[in-house]
Image (cartoon, rainbow, N blue to C red):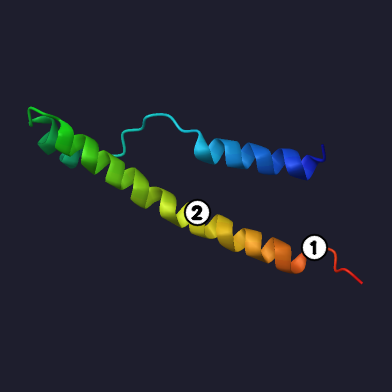
Amino acid sequence: MSKMKVRVFFILFSLFTFFSTNAQCAMCRAVLESEDGQSTAKGVNDGIVYLMVIPYVLVAGMGLVMYTKFYRKKKV
């Protein structure tokens, strides 16, 4: 396997494998932890993580387009 394939595999593996994270700020956490069910806190946390991932996916997509456009060998 080439080094490039290993790097791409590692990046894709690390993007799709994630651990449970707590992305709330201190104020949001204090307000949401006072609730009994904790379902709202989980929903807010999932929303924050979802919004955090979108820019990385867009930048990765742009990088892929640039790679395929400029660095692939042209067929003659």
Q: Residues within 10 Å of mark 1 (few under 14, many from 20)?
A: few
Q: Is residue 5 above or below residue 21?
A: below
Say whether disc 1 or disc 2 marks the residue closer to the N-terminus: 2
Please state, as top left, top right, bottom left or bottom right, where the N terminus lies in the image.
top right
The image quarter containing residue 25 is top left
Residue 55 position, x and y percent, is: 45, 56
Q: Is residue 25 left or right of residue 1?
A: left
Q: Amino acid at mark 1?
A: Arg
Please state, as top left, top right, bottom left or bottom right, where the C terminus lies in the image.
bottom right
Q: CA distance from mark 1 to mark 2?
A: 21 Å
At x 62%, y 60%, the residue is 63
At x 13%, y 36%, the residue is 32
Task: Say which element carries label 1.
Answer: loop
At x 38%, y 49%, the residue is 52
Q: Amino acid at mark 2?
A: Val
> Taking the image as drawn, is residue 27 in sight?
yes
Q: Is residue 58 above or below residue 70?
A: above
Seen from the viewer's position, the closer of residues 61 and 76 is 76
**Cβ atoms at labels 1 and 2 below 8 Å apart:** no
- Identify the residue position indicated by label 2 in the image: 57
> Any mark on residue 72, and which?
1
Q: Is residue 73 left or right of residue 51?
A: right
At x 75%, y 68%, the residue is 70
> Any mark on residue 22, and which?
none
Residue 14 position, x and y percent, is: 56, 36
Residue 46 position, x and y percent, is: 29, 41
Q: Residues within 10 Å of mark 2 (few under 14, many from 20)?
A: few
User: Please, which residue is most extreme toward the front here?
Assistant: 76
> Taking the image as drawn, is residue 25 in sight?
no
